[in-house]
Image (cartoon, coloured by chain):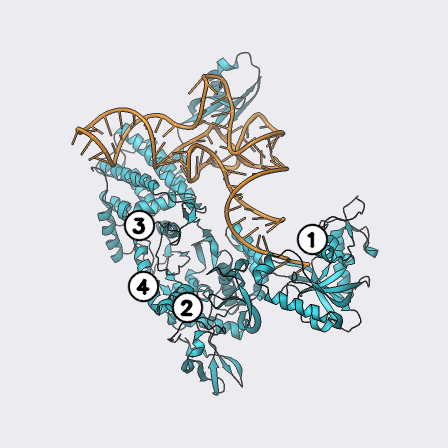
Amino acid sequence: MSTKYDFRKIEKKWREIWEKNPVNPTGTNKPKYYCLDMFPYPSGSGLHVGHWRGYVLSDVISRYKILQGFEILHPMGWDAFGLPAENYAIKTGTHPSVSTAESIENVKRQLHEISAIYDWSKEINTTDPNYYKWTQWIFIQMFKNGLAYEKEMPLNWCPNCKAVLANEEATNGVCDRCGSTVTKKNLRQWMLRITKYAERLLNDLGKLNWPEKVKKMQSDWIGKSYGAEIDFEVDGSDKSIKVFTTRPDTLYGATFMVLAPEHEIVSEITTDQYKDKVEKYILEASAKSSVDRMTDKEKTGVFTGSYGINPLNGAKVPIWISDYVLADYGTGAIMCVPAHDERDFDFAKKFDLPIIQVIKKEGSEISELKEAYVEEGVMVNSGPFDDMNSSLAKETIANYLQENGIGKKTVNYKLRDWVFSRQRYWGEPIPLVHCEKCGVVAVPEDQLPIELPKVESYQPTSTGQSPLSAIDEWVNTTCPKCGAPAKRETNTMPQWAGSSWYYLRYCDVNNDKELASKEALKKWLPVDLYVGGIEHAVLHLLYARFYTKFLYDIGVVDFDEPFLRLFNQGMITKDGAKMSKSEGNVVSPDDLVEKYGCDSLRMYELFVGPPEVDSEWDDSGIDGVFRYLNKVWKLVDENKDKNIEPTKELEQIRNKMIYEITNRLEALTMNTVVSGFMEYTNKIIAVSKKIGGVDKLTLDTVITLLCPFTPHIAEEMWQLTGHSDSVFKQSWPEYDKEKMKEDTVEIAIQLNGKFRESIKVDADAGKDEVIAMAKEKISARLQNLNIVKEIYVPGRIVNIVAK
RNA sequence: GCGGAUAUGGCGGAAUUGGCAGACGCGCCGGACUUAGAAUCCGGUUCUUACGAGUGGGGGUUCAAAUCCCCCUAUCCGCACCA
């Protein structure tokens, strides 16, 4: 037991000292660094070692930045609205505010075990009326600026949760929360016009230091495509149908048209003869769950009896309806070119519609198509455009349509407006009043927040109404405009609302005049580093960007992107699966802290694998870092009172160590930082054995480098080596490139590319000298061979090519 | 179906971006200390039939390839009738 360091005593001691003297003094004139964790939902089951991964990483960066001379904002808070607490309330009758408060207390205790330097005076909670006052305030600004609007629409409806879901919450037609199959229901909804920002949300991705993967996911989600809208007149009527296509070059090959079943013109153009069939089909399509509609690749559809006129060649093409055409993308209607589109091809084959090829592969002859030809090529069967290259024809035909008033070039986005209302209890009330005379009126800002009232029952109604609608004394109010009796909006906001702007609030949490003061925003924002899971790649991060851009437009903030750098930590798995209570594979940090201490766990969280990659948790690996910390402890303990003169070799190792640790830390390759610590400490120990000790500067350097990673043991060792102030008052060590150089270097000698021997040479030895030495070294192998070529890579390798 | 990523010892993973593959750690083997165990320390640890072979498989470029190019295979992730 002689050398084991007493982590329990040390960690307790330093936590108490930091409590009184925080290592991150505020109100300085230092440059700022804002390092933010994605704030958690306060779950009842607490944190596991997977949660720690991101939190440790951001804490290490924050502490590193302190030593680099920055003032740090590194806050934490709670995204506490949401379904789990509400579902728990439905089951037990416990008010969500009570159960979330309990969860918060537990998670906060666990966060203290990490010894992260969160500034708890800046804690925020999205369910605090002083916070959601500003969530509501932002909504009102959006409402006043025409970004919030009401719409009756068929929505994803989870029959189990009895809640409307956003498209994003109903991935693959299954409820994200409970896994039930999602159906459709028509309801009045509040929408946010995020599509107005589509172009900026797409373009500004270029400014961001984010993982390419995340940027790609966002740009795919926004889904910009260039094309044309083309008007097809309906034969024998004064109506026309607008279609959207990205392939105007194929217009001569359009042999039919398809409308979405929900398209409003369908009833007007359907002829009596086909009326029954069409109505039946529409009914079937609306009853189809979104799962079926997505997975049924087999095409269905019915003919309406009407024909459209191709505006270019006057051809009469039958108009069909089919659910493979989406009502809410483009114009909800398409022209179909079976020869050059796979889906149209399938449809044409199934319903025996004509296929006309209008593009052929260069140099080939036209023969019957076995599948749609979707490549570029040479125009055929296209009147004046024949023999033109199809990509040129795309442009030429689009221009022709535009010039002749039968179409126009357009851009389309996959991004849809954001369904912003929820028929649930545990969310921010939407601060609007419905007045019979004045219509929808925003609650005056001085009346905010509209507080969430207590209810008897949390159960949402199966009619789609929020539980709030049952509280007459809350619902009934007066119109802020005319004073007449009016009713409050009873829908609440989605959980995303509070998390779309929380990063702004941290810099000025107690402000009751503004969401944050201009000065505080100017000092701290935007966020320099944002750390969190990849699961928020699209939704949260897209919504937050949207909010920021809106607040920029109305002059609240002076930047239009909230997060300059994003880092997604990988998941920690156990037995190959994500840790979850239901899987029973949760590893709690509490036991490991008890057994090895916080410092060891912090270091192992980083060592377990590359931080951006998923890693399997292995308890036994933590022994390695625990042994390492004991080794450092022993090194410091044995040398603290010795007066060893620094040697050239120690200086070389020390400088190299600073260089390597710093570079790896900047690149966030934390696992290699830890291995670097081990590697260089081993080297120092080896030299120490040789010369009987280690100099003071080397010890100080090791301790200082370690302190962001293992703060408790670092502070203790710092004190042990005779320093009276905190190690966090130190500057990050600097290296001297000159001193990193070794006197001699080992050169590998290859013969015909194969390693044979190695030699030590002076670092400044010249090319000829080294090659001569190398040839001498492998002279036996060179007998009877003619040297063809000699390659020398300074400091690394000599390759002799010989036959 | 489309798009993206990954593949290195028994395991987690390194490799200065084309220059000695396997750093660092886990595990394992051997030794020291110990009455014994735990802990600690020291040594070893890609395979090998000892010639060599070797970074998922096959080809190529190069003096030199885990790294670059082409073709496969497997796994994971994202999107999924977006006209």
Where does the magenta region start and end? A453-461
Instruction: Compare marks 2 and 1 and give the one earlier in the sequence.
Output: 1
Give the CA distance from mark 1 to mark 4.
55 Å
Horizontally, residue A478 falls left or right of residue A720, namely: right
Asked if the residue under mark 3 is in contact with the one under mark 2, i.e. CB atoms within 8 Å, the reply is no
Residue at which label 3 appears: A728
Label 4, secondary structure: give it: helix
A661 w.r.t. A189: above or below: above
Ranked by sequence position, the earlier of labels 3 and 1 is 1
Task: Note whether A9 is above or below A164 in the view shown.
Answer: above
Q: Residue at x 26, y 45 (%)?
A: A718
Residue labelled with disc 1: A342
In primary-sequence order, the first of circles 2 and 3 is 2
In the rendered image, the quadrant that contains the N terminus of chain A is top left
The amino acid sitting under disc 1 is: Glu
Q: Colour of chain A?
A: cyan
Return the residue nearer the eye: A390 or A402.
Answer: A390
Q: Is residue A455 covered in magenta? A: yes
Query: Residue A209 appears at what percent x and percent y?
Result: 50, 52
Give the spatial CA distance, label 3 vs label 1. Answer: 64 Å
Q: Position of residue A422 (x, y in %)?
A: 48, 70
Q: Which residue is mark 2?
A: A517
Residue beneath label 4, please? Answer: A102
Q: Secondary structure at mark 3?
A: helix
Name chain B's colour.
orange
Q: Is residue A270 above or below residue A713?
A: below
The label number, if any, that marks residue A408 in the structure image:
none
In percent of the image, x 33 and y 51: which residue is there? A588
Q: Amino acid at mark 3?
A: Phe
Name the element at disc 1: helix
Is residue A190 shown to the viewer in this render?
yes
Disc 1 is attached to a residue of which chain? A
